[in-house]
Image (tube, rainbow, N blue to C red):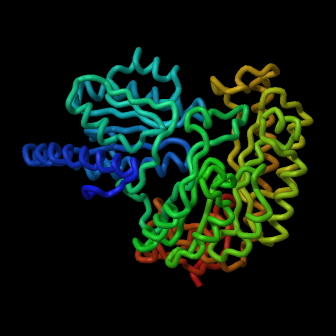
């Protein structure tokens, strides 16, 4: 990135120029390694958790590739290993610690020069940092959620020293645009429209590790979408912890509904998806925009978490069972045939059998096409972690199983309603089980398997649905 003398530039542009210079310096070293050893250095990247992390990892991988590292899917071959961590559930944290134990042996025995980097939400917790300093001193680079763009500088610092580099920020600074990126799919891409969260749900640690909400300008978002369209991308996923509150903190406020209409006008883009929508901020204006924008998929991920208004109050969700179901009614009235998915937590502190039955009532009435279901996981640092009336594990397990007994038949029925219909399916990849089968998603987000050839990937294919497998559909090309 060249900056001409005397030109007024944003701090973010100066920061990007700094990082690109670090990339160039590291590339020289890695190119010299390749000439001396007859092979490129390899990197292994693992993203855990949400789609925001997956998209962040695309940027991390893009920077590593520009530094001269070659991607590998074989962890035990890598010279650079990076985990983009999640702390929403305890299992994700335990997985990281388990891998770090193996990596200590890997560095001692097989590759002493390997660099291990950790980033993401887990790293924003002081208890995690203390554990790393005490038990996992073989980790080389540790950074958090606010300074992802500094990876080149951190790698350069580690290469020049023999110590672990910690760079943890407690709040965001500049949003650095135009980072190198490796998109995992050539014909679809994710676009961050905002970062952070202001909701402070009592069970959730995200606002503490990703900071307060900050929106990108619509100009920057549309410029990125146009660039993606020019590069052959046909489907974009607009990402934010709560997309419905997009634009409120901009100097010139823009609603998410207005942004959707702007993206809908970008030539070359054929489909628009988004997540996640918080029910408390889902407006009539947004429902109207979804109905009127021809490229916006008629699918809505609308996390309910609980069907009990009292539990929702304790969760600090700022809506009731009744107001949630009113949103469902309005969405279905404006877009007949729209499919809904959700998130549900079972066993939140104080949840009674009556509260649980309210959740089952919502499942029956909303008729979700799929749901992400969770047993409540205590997260240190959240208000819910110190609440009284924690529900016994055996009760939670029983309720969870009973919820699936209600949910899964409804998911099957909703999918069964699609049999006989013709859908346009975006062919995304070849099936891992059968090379003559393609997989992709319809406008309603349902997963469809159908016969096809690799050259069809990236195309919108008309498919007639002939069978229902509950969590996916079988189709035949028209």
Look at the picture and state if 142 lies above or below 447.
Answer: above
From the viewer's side, name the closer residue of 65 and 91: 65
Look at the picture and state if 411 lies above or below 26.
Answer: below
Q: Is residue 172 left or right of residue 156?
A: right
**What residue occupies the far top of the structure in this picture?**
134
Q: Is residue 426 left or right of residue 389?
A: left
Q: Is residue 2 visible?
A: no
Look at the picture and state if 350 lies above or below 365.
Answer: above
Q: Quadrant of the N terminus?
A: bottom left
Residue 280 spot, x, y in % from top left: 78, 49
From the viewer's side, name the closer residue of 444 and 289: 289
Image point (58%, 51%), residue name: 215
Image point (48%, 30%), residue name: 123
From the viewer's side, name the closer residue of 340 and 162: 162
Image point (39%, 24%), residue name: 101
Q: Is residue 229 left or right of residue 13?
A: right
Image point (56%, 47%), residue name: 195
Residue 317 spot, x, y in % from top left: 78, 41
**What residue occupies the far front of the structure in this picture?**
6
Residue 325 spot, x, y in % from top left: 86, 54
Q: Quadrant of the C terminus?
A: bottom right
Q: Which quarter of the figure has residue 320?
A: top right
Q: Is residue 221 visible?
A: yes
Q: Which quarter of the figure has residue 283?
A: bottom right
């Amino acid at each position: 990135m060249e900056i001409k003398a005397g030109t007024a530039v944003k701090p973010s542009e100066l920061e990007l120029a700094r990082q690109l210079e670090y990339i160039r310096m590291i590339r020289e070293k890695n190119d010299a390694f390749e000439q001396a050893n007859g092979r490129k250095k390899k990197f292994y990247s693992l993203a855990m958790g949400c789609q925001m992390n997956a998209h962040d990892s695309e940027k991390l991988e893009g920077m590593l590739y520009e530094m001269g590292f070659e991607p590998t899917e074989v962890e035990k071959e890598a010279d650079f290993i990076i985990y983009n961590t999640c702390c929403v559930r305890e299992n994700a944290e335990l997985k990281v610690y388990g891998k770090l134990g193996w990596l200590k042996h890997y560095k001692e025995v097989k590759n002493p020069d390997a660099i291990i980097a950790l980033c993401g939400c887990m790293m924003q917790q002081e208890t995690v940092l203390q554990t790393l300093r005490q038990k996992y001193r073989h980790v080389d680079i540790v950074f958090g959620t606010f300074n992802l763009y500094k990876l080149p500088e951190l790698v350069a610092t580690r290469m020049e020293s023999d110590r672990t580099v910690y760079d943890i920020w407690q709040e965001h600074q500049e949003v650095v645009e135009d980072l190198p990126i490796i998109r995992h799919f050539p014909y679809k891409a994710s676009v961050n429209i905002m970062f952070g969260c202001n909701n402070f749900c009592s069970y959730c640690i995200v606002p503490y590790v990703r900071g307060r909400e900050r929106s990108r300008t619509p100009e920057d978002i549309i410029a990125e979408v146009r660039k993606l369209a020019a590069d052959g991308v046909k489907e974009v996923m607009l990402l934010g912890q709560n997309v419905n509150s997009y634009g409120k903190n901009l100097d010139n406020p823009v609603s998410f509904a207005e942004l959707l209409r702007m993206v809908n006008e970008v030539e070359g883009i054929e489909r628009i998806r988004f997540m996640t929508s918080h029910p408390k901020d889902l407006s009539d204006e947004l429902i109207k925009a979804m109905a009127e924008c021809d490229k916006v998929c008629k699918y809505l991920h609308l996390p309910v978490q609980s069907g009990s208004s009292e539990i929702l109050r304790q969760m600090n969700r700022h809506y009731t069972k009744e107001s949630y179901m009113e949103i469902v009614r309005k969405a279905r009235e404006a877009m007949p045939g729209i499919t809904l998915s959700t998130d549900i937590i079972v066993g939140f502190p104080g949840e009674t059998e009556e509260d649980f039955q309210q959740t089952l009532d919502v499942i029956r009435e909303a008729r979700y096409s799929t749901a992400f279901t969770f047993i409540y996981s205590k997260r240190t640092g959240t208000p819910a972690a110190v609440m009284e009336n924690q529900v016994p594990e055996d009760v939670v397990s029983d309720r969870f199983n009973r919820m699936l007994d209600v949910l899964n038949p409804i998911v099957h029925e909703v999918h069964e309603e699609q049999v006989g219909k013709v859908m346009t399916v975006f062919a995304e990849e070849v099936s891992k089980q059968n090379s003559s089968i393609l997989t992709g998603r319809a406008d309603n987000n349902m997963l469809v398997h159908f016969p096809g050839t690799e050259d069809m990937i990236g195309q919108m294919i008309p498919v007639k649905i002939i069978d229902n497998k509950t969590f996916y559909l079988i189709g035949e090309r028209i």
